[in-house]
Image (cartoon, rainbow, N blue to C red):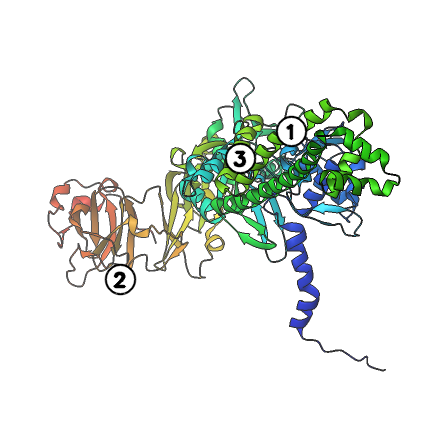
């Protein structure tokens, strides 16, 4: 079999020749917006509509616009239509839509609400487009050939306000992206005016925070906002707005973060209900209609709506994050800029547009003035002009003869020659020549403005004030300050109820809500099993499980599944991954790690360990050296406060002592202090609470000081039933 010849090629060369041109095309010609606030696809579409006369005319079918746009944008018709949809008033994606629309254009806040086909919908340019096309026919921006050289299209649009920051824009290129949030038009105009007056102005005084067409609430964090304003990168949180309908016991969500959709929210809430993480919702409905967005949550009786929403903010995109990346093209190169940086570039761009417009006006007015000055010269002798024309035998000599007769140039002569015979009267010529003085004054003012950027800035400021007055609208996104909000912690997300924990001899753990326990208190256990510990706690507590291997395991009570008295419960060796010979001997439930542990050892020592020693910041699940392994443990107990205990030795010596005499330690594996002294090689065999023994005379065994050897058990106390030691 013949082998094919393989051509070796360096990967770097392949990338440079094949991939890099594509990457640059995506960055420069597709995904990243420019200083006018538009991507090429937006610009081509809007300019096509402008040339179609849709700025002042009636609406036309979207299909017509799509077809015409293909002359500038050689992509598929549906791609162009999708771009058009986002720019429409009906889609609600922009604070200030550029397209006035009629028909179904879907909604920005809905993933599944499909827009109608372009043959059914109608569009025209919205009034605000007067500001993005202002003076475009006066050479304010450069024009280039379209893809086949048959038409001209603008490289930028001469927007009279910083559109780049007024409407949101998102783009994903190759190796970079752009995500620009929107700001309120009135606030942005005020900020730009302040910047034009003083470049060192504090923009936070006028530019409060981003504003979105979807409304909702913005959680204001001064540090985050300043970082975005200064660097163009950062993030902030948005959350939904809701109201509680007491009569129907339901929550109505009517505004959601710009970054999410109703379907995503509903799907997540349904999942939370199915998995049991949220138990207060009986039904959820999407009731969005012509009046706007609405998600309705039916609640169980006695549900706290604010508490429930706090949980949903944490668990769903009802509270979401908007990540900013102000990456825009400046002179064909992508640059990440803060707000002031963007305003600086836009100001430079806008000043250049106005200079070009003024230059255009100067040229036009100068040409007109030149013609009128020629016309003024024939005013001295109209009859002479008529005579020259009448006596000239050949048409080709009319212009030269007029030039010679009145000392005017060819352009002036041609203008005079084209005047209608009926206008060769003194009144007409006087009216026209009266314009000379006003034109000269206008030209003087224009030249003065052209050479003075301060005057140009005043022009921009005047335009911005007019725009703010004409198109400004109140903020849609409400600002709430982070420090005024209740922090949503994990505790808010946990259902709180009282329960009991049962530990059995054969290592089963049962977590039973009290309400369930009242209904059925008969405990089901395996054969020959028995309950060795029972504690009452709540669902928000931490559980410490001490093993016979000097280890403590930590669990959140809410992480353990509820069970009924008729169930066996959780098998701890499986739940905690215990060693084969390891066994849980004691459990403690705590909410605040107050109190202490008492570990009693065979050698007569007792260690009093602060429970806070078992609290960890990293939520570790397993702590070694939970107590001393120097001697055999015979008793373990958790106490909130000091009490009296009874210690028994192997030679029937008894000691009653107070735990207050034992010093508190923070080292978990402390050996403790000597409480019961050994006599004749005796050992401590058990420890009991005072209320667990029935002695005739406790004072006989009581001691004020430790260590002590205790007193021999009296004959009358020997026959009392004593609680046996756990094994």
Q: Tell me residue 440's x, y (percent).
A: 59, 34
Q: Which mark is residue 192?
A: none
Give the SS element for disc 2.
loop
Q: At x 66% / y 34%, what residue is drawn? A: 98
Give the SS element for disc 3.
helix
Furthest-right residue in this view? 393
Nearest-to-viewer mark from 2 and 3: 3
Q: Residue 435 carries which label?
A: 1
Q: Tell me residue 151's x, y (percent).
A: 78, 47
Q: In this view, does 579 lie above or below 530?
A: below
Q: Is residue 586 left or right of residue 339?
A: left
First in residue order: circle 2 vs circle 3? 3
From this viewpoint, is residue 141 visible?
Answer: yes
Q: Quadrant of residue 112?
A: top right
Furthest-top residue in this view? 247
Q: In this view, does 595 lie to the left or right of 579?
A: left
Q: Is residue 382 left or right of residue 444?
A: right
CA gap, disc 1 to disc 2? 114 Å
Q: What residue would you read off at disc 3?
A: 459
Q: CB of mark 1 within 8 Å of CB of mark 2?
A: no
Q: At x 39% / y 33%, what residue is drawn? A: 484
Q: Tell me residue 534's x, y (percent).
A: 38, 42
CA gap, disc 2 to disc 3? 90 Å
Q: What residue would you read off at disc 2?
A: 631
């Amino acid at each position: 079999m013949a082998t094919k010849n393989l051509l070796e090629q360096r990967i770097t060369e392949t990338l440079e020749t094949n991939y890099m041109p594509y990457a640059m095309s995506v960055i420069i010609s597709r995904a990243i917006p420019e200083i006018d606030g538009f991507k090429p696809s937006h610009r081509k579409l809007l300019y096509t509509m402008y040339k179609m006369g849709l700025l002042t005319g009636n609406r036309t079918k979207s299909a017509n616009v799509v077809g015409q746009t293909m002359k500038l944008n050689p992509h598929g018709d549906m791609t162009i239509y999708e771009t058009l949809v986002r720019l429409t008033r009906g889609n609600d994606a922009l604070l200030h839509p550029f397209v006035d629309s009629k028909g179904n254009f879907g909604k920005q806040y809905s993933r599944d609400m499909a827009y109608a086909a372009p043959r059914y919908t109608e569009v025209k340019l919205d009034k605000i487009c007067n500001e993005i096309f202002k003076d475009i026919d006066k050479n304010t921006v450069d024009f280039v050939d379209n893809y086949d050289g048959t038409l001209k299209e603008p490289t930028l649009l001469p927007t009279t306000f910083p559109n780049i920051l007024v409407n949101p824009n998102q783009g994903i290129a190759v190796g970079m992206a752009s995500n620009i949030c929107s700001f309120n038009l009135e606030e942005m105009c005020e900020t730009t005016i302040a910047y034009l007056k003083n470049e060192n102005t504090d923009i936070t005084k006028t530019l409060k925070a981003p504003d979105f067409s979807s409304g909702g609430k913005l959680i204001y964090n001064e540090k985050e906002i300043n970082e975005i304003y200064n660097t163009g990168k950062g993030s902030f949180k948005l959350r939904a707005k809701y109201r509680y309908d007491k009569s129907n016991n339901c929550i109505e969500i009517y505004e959601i973060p710009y970054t999410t959709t109703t379907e995503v929210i509903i799907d997540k809430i349904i999942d939370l209900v199915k998995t049991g993480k949220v138990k207060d919702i009986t039904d959820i409905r999407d009731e969005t209609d012509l009046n706007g967005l609405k998600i309705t949550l039916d609640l169980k009786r006695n549900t706290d709506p604010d508490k429930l929403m706090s949980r949903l903010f944490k668990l769903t995109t009802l509270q979401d994050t908007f990540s900013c990346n102000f990456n825009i093209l400046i002179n064909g190169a992508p640059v990440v800029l803060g707000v002031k940086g963007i305003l600086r570039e836009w100001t430079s761009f806008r000043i250049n547009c106005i200079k070009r417009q003024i230059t255009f006006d100067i040229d036009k007015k100068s040409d007109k003035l030149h013609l009128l000055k020629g016309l003024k010269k024939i005013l001295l002798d109209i009859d002479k002009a008529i005579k020259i024309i009448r006596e000239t035998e050949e048409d080709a000599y009319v212009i030269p003869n007029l030039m010679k007769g009145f000392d005017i140039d060819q352009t002036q002569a041609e203008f005079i020659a084209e005047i209608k015979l009926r206008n060769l009267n003194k009144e007409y010529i006087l009216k026209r020549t009266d314009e000379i003085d006003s034109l000269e004054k206008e030209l003087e003012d224009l030249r003065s403005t052209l050479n003075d950027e301060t005057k140009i800035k005043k022009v921009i400021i005047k335009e911005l004030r007019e725009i703010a007055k004409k198109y400004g609208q109140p903020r849609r996104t409400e600002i709430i300050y982070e420090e005024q909000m209740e922090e949503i912690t994990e505790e808010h997300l946990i259902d709180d109820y009282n329960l009991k924990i049962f530990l059995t001899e054969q290592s089963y753990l049962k977590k039973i809500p009290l309400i369930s326990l009242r209904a059925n208190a008969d405990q089901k256990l395996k054969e020959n099993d028995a309950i060795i510990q029972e504690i009452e706690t709540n669902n928000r507590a931490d559980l410490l499980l001490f093993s016979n291997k000097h280890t403590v395991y930590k669990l959140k009570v809410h992480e353990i599944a509820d069970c009924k008295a008729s169930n066996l419960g959780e098998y701890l060796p499986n739940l905690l991954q215990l060693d084969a010979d390891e066994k849980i001997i004691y459990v403690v439930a705590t909410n605040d790690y107050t109190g202490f542990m008492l570990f009693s050892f065979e050698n007569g020592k007792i260690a009093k360990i602060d429970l806070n020693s078992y609290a960890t910041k990293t939520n570790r699940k397993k702590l070694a050296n939970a107590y001393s392994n120097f001697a055999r443990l015979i008793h373990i107990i958790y106490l909130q406060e000091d009490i009296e205990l009874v210690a028994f030795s192997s030679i029937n010596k008894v000691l009653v002592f107070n735990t207050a005499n034992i010093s508190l330690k923070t080292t978990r594996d402390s050996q403790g202090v000597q409480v019961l002294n050994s006599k004749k090689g005796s050992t401590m065999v058990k420890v009991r609470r005072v209320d667990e023994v029935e002695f005739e005379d406790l004072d006989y065994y009581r001691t004020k000081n430790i260590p002590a050897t205790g007193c021999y058990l009296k004959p009358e106390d020997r026959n009392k039933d004593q609680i046996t030691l756990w094994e």
